[in-house]
Image (cartoon, rainbow, N blue to C red):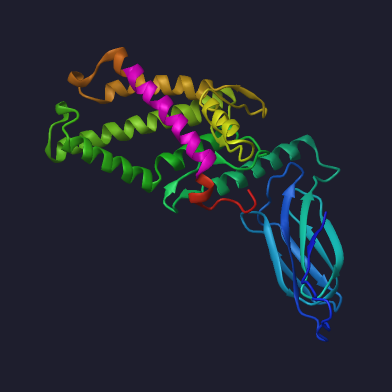
């Protein structure tokens, strides 16, 4: 599939006698639409000039200042069959090549499984570069609807990197300071020791909720902890989709199912967090369900932000997503 845009020539003007340079660019994906970083792309021009580049984290490549005339490109990537395209570049033309690589015909089931693991690893690395305003980690939003499911090890790896990201740790430290200043849990006391108790309890509570909902239960129940942005349709449809995703999620089989990981994980984390705070400030089941309800509202608000605003305010989002 080629998408061509050229430089317009006004009627009555004489074209320049010296052809201007154009460019050849594109995006490399697999058969499911997942981008392929680090693919090698080689351009061969009519004058036998050869140049090579690799795709970036968004799977894109670009050859600027390509002379007009015939050319061909060849794409190779580990685990995929090579692909080639050819064409003729007009003066000043920008030639786009969306290329989907296929698995080799001789690929065995074991190799397919290894390739899916590698694709999931690449996609996870892209997710880990996403940050709101370039600062706040936004690792659990997925803009690629065909993203490969994470395996159990990858779910734990992503949760660990999210939990102990310096920005999240700093936010927890700030929250502990605010809580101490307002004497939210008087049993912790004031001073350095009191602050350490606030910080330890908040960090333990945050980590417990994240590891249960994003790693342990998704690994056991074979569910995907990421939010998949719908990104199209009416505002109402996207709003309802975001709210519904508090209660449903994608399974590792790519089908939709009840979000047991998020619901059970949130409830369990709310109950466990009781034990991180002073006995005088605990309220048994009442506090557990209060925290669980807050978590549901927070999840819905987070999904709405992801659906309508995160693409605009986040850095590291793949191009074309």
Give the extent of the magenta segment. 288-309
Q: Is residue 65 visible?
A: yes
Residue pictured at 27% horizontal, 42% vertical: 173
Answer whether residue 299 is magenta in the image.
Answer: yes
Q: Position of residue 290 (x, y in %)?
A: 33, 19
Q: Position of residue 212 (x, y in %)?
A: 45, 27
272 vs 60: above or below: above
Q: Nearer the viewer, residue 174 or 193?
A: 174
Residue pictured at 24% horizontal, 25% vertical: 277
15 vs 32: above or below: below
Q: Position of residue 91 (x, y in %)?
A: 80, 76
Q: Nearer the viewer, residue 27 or 196?
A: 27
Residue pictured at 61% horizontal, 21% vertical: 257
Q: Position of residue 50 (x, y in %)?
A: 79, 73
Quadrant of res 77: bottom right
Q: Nearer the viewer, residue 83 or 111?
A: 83
Question: For this view, does 210 lie left or right of residue 48?
Answer: left
Quadrant of res 252: top right
Q: Quadrant of the N terminus?
A: bottom right
């Amino acid at each position: 599939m080629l998408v061509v845009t050229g430089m317009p020539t006004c009627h009555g003007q004489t074209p320049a006698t010296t052809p201007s340079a154009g460019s050849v660019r594109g995006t490399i994906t697999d058969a499911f639409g997942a981008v392929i970083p680090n693919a090698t792309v080689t351009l061969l021009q009519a004058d036998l000039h050869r140049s090579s580049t690799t795709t970036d984290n968004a799977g894109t490549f670009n050859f600027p200042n390509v002379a007009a005339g015939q050319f061909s490109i060849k794409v190779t990537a580990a685990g995929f069959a090579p692909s080639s395209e050819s064409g003729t570049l007009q003066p000043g033309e920008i030639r786009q090549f969306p290329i989907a690589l296929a698995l080799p015909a001789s690929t065995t089931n074991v190799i397919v499984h290894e390739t899916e693991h590698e694709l999931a690893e690449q996609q996870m690395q892209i997710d880990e570069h996403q940050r709101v305003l370039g600062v706040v980690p936004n690792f659990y939003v997925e803009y690629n609807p065909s993203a490969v499911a994470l395996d159990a090890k990858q779910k734990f790896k992503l949760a660990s990197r999210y939990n102990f990201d310096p920005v999240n740790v700093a936010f927890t430290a700030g929250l502990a300071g605010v809580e101490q200043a307002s004497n939210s849990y008087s049993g912790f006391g004031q001073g350095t020791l009191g602050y350490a108790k606030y910080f330890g309890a908040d960090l333990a509570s945050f980590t417990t909720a994240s590891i249960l909902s994003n790693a342990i239960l998704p690994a056991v129940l074979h569910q995907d902890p990421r939010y998949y942005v719908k990104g199209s349709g009416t505002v109402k449809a996207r709003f309802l989709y975001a709210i519904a995703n508090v209660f449903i999620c994608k399974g590792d089989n790519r089908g939709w199912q009840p979000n047991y990981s998020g619901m059970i994980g949130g409830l369990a984390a709310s109950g466990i967090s009781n034990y991180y705070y002073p006995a005088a400030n605990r309220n048994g089941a009442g506090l557990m369900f209060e925290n669980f309800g807050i978590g549901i509202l927070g999840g819905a608000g987070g999904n709405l932000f992801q659906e309508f605003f995160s693409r605009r305010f986040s850095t590291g989002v793949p191009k074309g997503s």
